[in-house]
Amino acid sequence: MKIQIPKGETIEINTIVLDLNGTLAVKGIVSDKTKELILKLKELNYRIVLISGDIRGNAKIISDELGIELFLGVTSQEKAEQMLQFDKETTAAIGNARIDIGTFENSKISIATMQSEGIHTEILRYVDVIVPTIEDALSLFIDIKSLAGTLRK
């Protein structure tokens, strides 16, 4: 999906990489609204990918349920290595924790969510956008004018 930043560049995002715990799922649960948004993004031809340290042991169950790709990355470095298989210029990353720095560094757009599992302050220098919830983050790729407005200089 092409995003025209007012008086700026045009960005094309084709892949959205998600963290699991504290981002896609809160306390191990993916909300119904989040599931609906994932389905809508897939209908819009975004490639949705989950890279998780799988601290709760449910990443495969969730990825299978949502029909999205799963890669494991137990450290920020491992997540960074997983990101090398994607085109940095067309990939967005969404996360909340220090382990997500590796995904943020290797994406064109990085978004942090501030849900109830918290946000690590060290990631702030690596993110472009901060939103309250995963629903807000995913919605930015559906209503791209909101994302363009947020990224405008």
Image (spheres, helix red, strand yellow):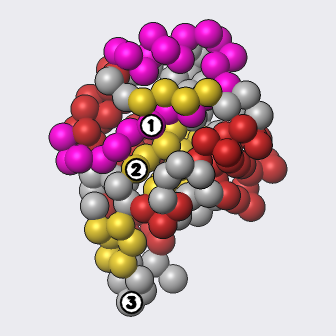
In primary-sequence order, the first of circles 2 and 1 is 2
Q: Residue at x 62, y 10 (%)?
A: 57
The residue that label 1 is drawn on is 49
SS at circle 2: strand
Q: Measure the alpha-carbon separation of dots 2 and 1.
A: 7 Å
Does 107 appear in magenta? no
Amino acid type of the residue that numbered disc 3 sits on in the rendered structure: Lys
Amino acid type of the residue that numbered disc 2 sits on in the rendered structure: Thr
Residue 99: tell me if it is visible: no
The residue that label 3 is drawn on is 7
Residue 4: tell me if it is visible: yes
Does 44 appear in magenta? yes
Q: Nearer the viewer, residue 76 or 85?
A: 85
Q: For residue 115, which quarter of the picture?
A: top right
Amino acid type of the residue that numbered disc 1 sits on in the rendered structure: Val
Category of crowding for the residue at label 2, using alpha-carbon neighbours closer than 10 angstroms: few (below 14), some (14–19), many (at least 20): many
Left or right of residue 45, residue 121 in this image: right
- Which residue reaches farthest left? 43
**Range of residues picked out in magenta:** 43-65
CB under 8 Å between callouts 2 and 1? yes
Residue 128 in percent (x, y) is at 58, 63
The residue that label 2 is drawn on is 15
* Marker count (numbered): 3
Residue 79 in percent (x, y) is at 67, 40
Category of crowding for the residue at label 3, using alpha-carbon neighbours closer than 10 angstroms: few (below 14), some (14–19), many (at least 20): few
SS at circle 1: strand
Q: Measure the alpha-carbon separation of dots 1 and 3.
A: 31 Å
Q: Residue at x 45, y 37 (%)?
A: 49
CB under 8 Å between callouts 3 and 2? no
Residue 22 in percent (x, y) is at 61, 28
In primary-sequence order, the first of circles 1 and 3 is 3
Instruction: Name the disc covering residue 115, or none.
Output: none
